[in-house]
Amino acid sequence: MNDFWSYWYFHIPNFILAAVMYTLIGRLVLGLFVPESWDNYIWRFFKSVTDPFLRAVRSITPSILTQPVVIVFSVLWLMALRVFYLVFLINFGIAPMASQGG
């Protein structure tokens, strides 16, 4: 039996959260070298994927903080969300188990 499809309810949300988290990191690093108004297609992609999440985090973050700091907080929130989701699944006994070896 394929473990991915057996635990799709763990893998798919975890993958989406990880993809957004790493896209935020990419935006942060690329943002060190390019202006916010840059019109490159990669930059537009990073912004389109991460802007909705940044708006949500910005609404609970003090307005004095700069955009790069909000991006760092967003990455931390996503890391925490991934851990909390795993703990949630473990508490209900439906989390994927580590294999016992090969």
Image: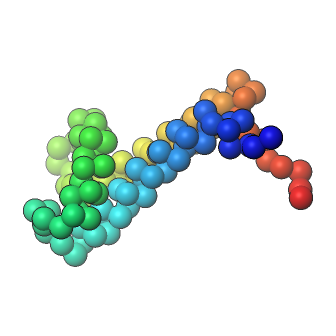
* Residue 22 position by quadrant: bottom left
What percent of the width, then of the height, locates residue 43?
Answer: 23, 63
What percent of the width, then of the height, locates residue 39?
Answer: 13, 65
Location of the N terminus by quadrant is: top right
In the current view of this chain or complex, which residue is farthest to the left? 37
In this rendering, position of residue 64 left or right of residue 69 = left
Q: Is residue 41 above or below residue 82?
A: below
Q: Residue at x 18, y 72 (%)?
A: 34
Q: Residue at x 89, y 58 (%)?
A: 102
What percent of the width, then of the height, locates residue 50?
Answer: 30, 49
What percent of the width, then of the height, locates residue 72?
Answer: 35, 55
Q: Choose between 37 and 90: the one closer to the eye.
A: 37
In the current view of this chain or complex, which residue is farthest to the bottom? 33
Q: Choose between 62 and 55: the one closer to the eye.
A: 55
Q: Residue at x 73, y 39 (%)?
A: 96
Q: Residue at x 23, y 35 (%)?
A: 59
